Structures are given as structure tokens and as C-alpha cells.
Amino acid sequence: MSESSNYLDPSVLKGLSQFLDEEKQLHLLDRYLYDSQQLIEQLVSALTDNDATEARRMVHSLKSTSANVGALPLSSLSKELEMLAAEEKLDEVRSRVDELIECFAHTSEAINNLDIMQSRQAS
């Protein structure tokens, strides 16, 4: 199994390509990477502030957007953290932030290694 398929569901990506032209796919993936990084930073801030509502909102958004681009492991992990935040178990969420960051790093790498992203970098 390739690195990409460990972190990205090819069937979701194929579905996107049926509805979006290459330029829109690139924009979607770029936006996903940027927004996800922001959500993770805002999650860390919410955890620092002991704000369970904001922490839940950040991981809920990350869960949804990750599922939309086929980043299912990141979506699944975000769902687990969302449930913990909803139960105000912020220490448990904090203990898994590094895992979330690492999963996002692998997801980002997999996205950047997609043919569509590589073809843009080559031009």
C-alpha cells in the first residue's frame, strides 16, 4: 500500500475529479491544507484556554473537511477528539494533539505527492 493510500482514500479523490476540473481540485486541496493547519493551531489555542466548546468546534470542522477530501484517517481521529471535547475531556484531547499533528503531516505529504499536485510543481 502506498503512502498516499494510507492517508487518502483514492475513491474520494476520484469522485472529486469527476466534478471538479484540475484548477478547482488544486484550489480545493491547497485550501484544505491551509485551513486544516489553521484549525489545528486554533485547537491548540482553545486547549490552552481550556475552551471545550471551541476545541470541539475545531476538531468537528477538521473532521468534516478531511472527509470531504478523502483524508479518512485524519477525519476519524478528529471524530474521536470531537467526542472527547464534547465530554469536556480536554486532558485526553491534549494528550492526542501530537498524534493529530503527525497524522496531518502525513496527510499533507500524501496530498503534495498526488499526481495533480506534482504536475503543477513541474510546470
Image: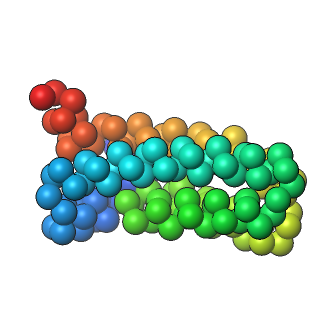
Taking depth in this image into account, of 32 and 91 the one nearest to the observer is 32
Q: Residue drawn 37% across and 60% down?
A: 69
* Whether residue 123 is situated above or below residue 32 in the rendered picture: above
Asked if one can make out residue 99 in the rendered structure from this viewpoint, the answer is no
The C terminus lies in quadrant: top left
Residue 83 percent location from the top left of the image: 73, 70
Residue 2 percent location from the top left of the image: 34, 43
On the image, which quarter does residue 119 sit in?
A: top left
Q: Residue drawn 77% across and 52% down?
A: 46
In the rendered view, does 29 fall on the left or right side of 32?
left
On the image, which quarter does residue 78 sit in?
A: bottom right
Q: Residue drawn 51% across and 38% down?
A: 105
On the image, which quarter does residue 122 sit in?
A: top left
In the rendered view, does 53 fall on the left or right side of 73?
right
Taking depth in this image into account, of 62 and 110 the one nearest to the observer is 62
Q: Residue drawn 47% across and 59% down?
A: 66
